[in-house]
Image (tube, rainbow, N blue to C red):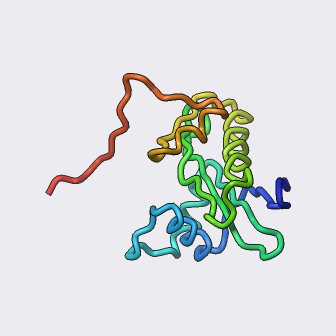
């Protein structure tokens, strides 16, 4: 699918791991001690992995993924657009494609954890705060 600015929105099973690690850095989600060679395993292990590609360069300018069992629940993660490409609707295209991947498989419970100050981005696509729920993260006790 080609969208605004002729950016291609692609469902992929692998991609250049350096480009993907750069996007994780863009989202401030990358630790330099991590090994980027495993990123294609992450991509293949995702229910859906979407890349927004600039056809002029062939490089990834955005990404997002869904983790799911493919039957009941799904979680959208790692949605990021390179700063130079923000404000063009690319993030919305990625999000809508991720939602479509889920709903076309019959998955209607789709969750995510929004970063602070990004809530307004998700509201028009049907997301809302889950009142009475608190996101939690496991941290190994030492």
- Left or right of 115? Residue 58 is right
Q: Residue at x 57, y 34 (%)?
A: 110
The residue nearer to you, when weighing 68 against 63, is: 63
Q: Residue at x 53, y 66 (%)?
A: 26
Total marks placed: 0
- Left or right of 140? Residue 55 is right
Looking at this rendering, what residue extends furthest in the top direction? 132
Query: As displayed, is residue 135 above or below residue 55?
Result: above
Query: As displayed, is residue 75 above or below residue 8?
Result: above
Q: Position of residue 53 (x, y in %)?
A: 75, 65
Q: Position of residue 114 (x, y in %)?
A: 49, 43
Looking at this rendering, what residue extends furthest in the left direction? 142
Q: Residue at x 63, y 28 (%)?
A: 108
- Left or right of 71? Residue 117 is left
Query: As displayed, is residue 7 above or below residue 101?
Result: below
Q: Position of residue 79 (x, y in %)?
A: 58, 53
> Which quadrant of the figure contains the C terminus?
bottom left
Q: Position of residue 62 (x, y in %)?
A: 66, 61
The residue nearer to you, when weighing 85 against 62, is: 85
The residue nearer to you, when weighing 128 against 118, is: 118
């Amino acid at each position: 699918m080609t969208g605004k600015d002729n950016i291609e929105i692609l469902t992929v099973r692998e991609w250049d791991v350096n480009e993907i690690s750069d996007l994780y850095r863009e989202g401030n989600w990358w630790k330099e001690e991590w090994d980027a060679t495993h990123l294609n395993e992450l991509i293949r292990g995702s229910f859906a992995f979407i890349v927004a590609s600039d056809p002029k360069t062939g490089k990834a300018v955005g990404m997002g993924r869904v983790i799911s069992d493919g039957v009941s629940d799904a979680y959208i993660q790692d949605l990021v657009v390179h700063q130079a490409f923000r404000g063009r609707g690319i993030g919305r295209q990625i999000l809508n494609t991720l939602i479509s991947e889920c709903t076309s498989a019959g998955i209607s419970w789709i969750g995510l954890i929004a970063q602070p100050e990004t809530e307004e981005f998700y509201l028009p696509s049907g997301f809302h705060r889950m009142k009475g729920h608190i996101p939690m993260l496991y941290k190994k006790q030492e």
